[in-house]
Image: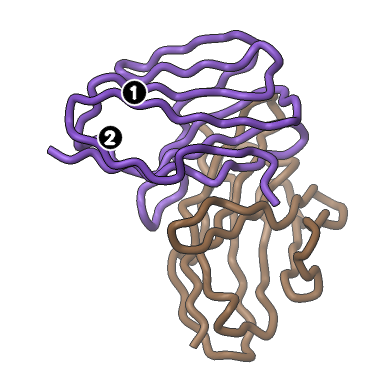
Amino acid sequence: TQLLEQSPQFLSIQEGENLTVYCNSSSVFSSLQWYRQEPGEGPVLLVTVVTGGEVKKLKRLTFQFGDARKDSSLHITAAQPGDTGLYLCAGVNNDMRFGAGTRLTVKP
Amino acid sequence: GAVVSQHPSRVICKSGTSVKIECRSLDFQATTMFWYRQFPKKSLMLMATSNEGSKATYEQGVEKDKFLINHASLTLSTLTVTSAHPEDSSFYICSAKAGTAYGYTFGSGTRLTVV
């Protein structure tokens, strides 16, 4: 059972389109992290959000932490084929638990 | 930055044998380490949390006698898959917490195949 509901699980879009990935939970987290993982490798941290309502931008990626610190979103603007990969959200308290992941494919 | 070295990266073993996976923090002391399991095209599932010098805490449904975790020092945690079976084949990843609020670092993972 995963504490974090991540959606969508699969997403296939054309280059240049925008997309949003959602991560929701009934639990409050001290922080929430977003990772990207390539096949056969460990996840790589993209961002950590800590404060309710916080918004962080990383180039074309925008991350938001819900006011109640129970949910988060990842928005990608003008997606590129290089954005293809598995995106994971992870809620942090005394441990770290992951959402189901979103497998993104960006077609040229 | 904090680096976690995980070995081996790939291992193939026969059914019934045991396999040990090591996770080392190279430039920091890891008071807590986490072990995850990942099936193909799935997310990471937390298996257990290990704290240096004490027994590991296992998640519900994870057999502690099958997945032995030892965290004997501040830089090393090991996961031993005992009496491995084909259904144990998976990608295992460790993560270390350096003691800071947000300092989680992942190993590169171990692909275990049991034949």
Amino acid at the residue labelled 2: Asp
Residue B37 - label: none
Q: Quadrant of residue A30?
A: top right
Position above or below: B57 against A67: below
Residue under the point 36% across and 20% down:
A61
Secondary element at image label 2: helix
Q: Nearer the viewer, residue A94 or A97?
A: A97
Q: Please report, as a chain letter, where disc 1 is located.
A: A
Secondary element at image label 1: strand
Write down which chain is painted brown: B
User: What hue does chain A carry in this figure?
Assistant: purple
| Residue position for label 1 | A76
Amino acid at the residue labelled 1: Ile
The x and y percentages for residue A91 are 65, 33
Q: Nearer the viewer, residue A42 or A69?
A: A69
Position above or below: B17 against A10: below
Position above or below: B111 against B27: below
Residue under the point 36% across and 54% down:
A39
The x and y percentages for residue B56 are 81, 56
Position above or below: B112 against B31: below
The x and y percentages for residue B76 are 66, 54
Q: Nearer the viewer, mark 1 or mark 2?
A: 1
Residue under the point 53% across and 44% down:
B106
Give the farthest residue toward the right: B54
| Residue position for label 2 | A83
Q: Please report, as a chain letter, where disc 2 is located.
A: A
Q: Nearer the viewer, residue B95 or A36?
A: A36
How much space separates mark 1 and mark 2, taking CA atoms? 9 Å
Contact (Cβ within 8 Å) of mark 1 with mark 2: yes
Q: How is the image coloured?
A: by chain
Nearer the N terminus, badge 1 or badge 2?
A: 1
The x and y percentages for residue B46 are 67, 52
